[in-house]
Image (cartoon, grey):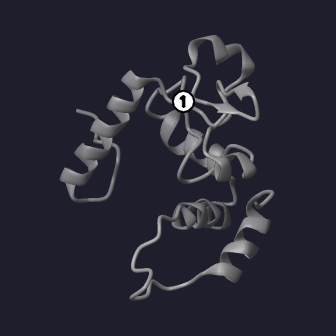
Amino acid sequence: MARGFPEAMRIIVAGVSEPSMTAPFRYSDTGFIVLAELVRRVSGEPLDRFTHKRFYQPLGMRDTTFNPPKAWRPRIAPTEFVQGQMLRGVVHDPRARELHGVAGHAGSSPPPMISGASAACCSRAARSGDGSIFLPLP
């Protein structure tokens, strides 16, 4: 398993394979891992800082973050046992954990109400047709 994005990218590039007749589909989160690295290379910021600055903060999503602080843990639902320890406030996806809890496919921890609000925002953006996630102020 990789230890951070540079190592993950080396492993991904070395192991990329195309679907075949004997293996037409294989679950993979590789694209989302690559997406996070692409965000870092284009913006100059890691995914957690980029999403905080560009999405969560402008939308007022104060309780949404990667790697929530320990003080928030009593408000976070536990997810599963890993190596005899219940995970709470720690991403349960093993690849995302190896990427220090910040990955394009897992790791962000919004409360359920906020998750719905962000989904609604993305839905409005899809309908707007201009690619913007923010609607103009009235």
- The residue positioned 39% from the left and 88% from the top of the image is 21
Residue 123 lies, in percent from the top left, at 25, 45
- The residue positioned 23% from the left and 44% from the top of the image is 124
Residue 14 lies, in percent from the top left, at 71, 82
Give the camera-side residue of 23 and 75. Answer: 23
Question: In the image as oriented, which residue stretches furthest toward the front?
Answer: 22
- The residue positioned 28% from the left and 35% from the top of the image is 137
Q: Amino acid at mark 1?
A: Thr
The quarter of the rendered structure image containing the N terminus is bottom right
> How crowded is the residue under tag 1: few (<14 C-alpha within 10 Å), some, or many (20+)?
some
Which residue is label 1 attached to? 64
Residue 80 lies, in percent from the top left, at 60, 30
Residue 93 lies, in percent from the top left, at 61, 45
Vertical position of residue 125 compared to residue 63: above or below: below
> Viewed as shown, does residue 110 lie left or right of 121?
right
Vertical position of residue 35 compared to residue 13: above or below: above
Q: Quadrant of residue 107?
A: top right
Q: Quadrant of residue 15?
A: bottom right
Give the camera-side residue of 69 and 94. Answer: 94
Q: Quadrant of residue 83?
A: top right
The quarter of the rendered structure image containing the C terminus is top left
Vertical position of residue 62 compared to residue 43: above or below: above
Question: In the image as oriented, which residue stretches furthest toward the left?
Answer: 127
Give the camera-side residue of 7 and 25. Answer: 25
- The residue positioned 69% from the left and 53% from the top of the image is 46
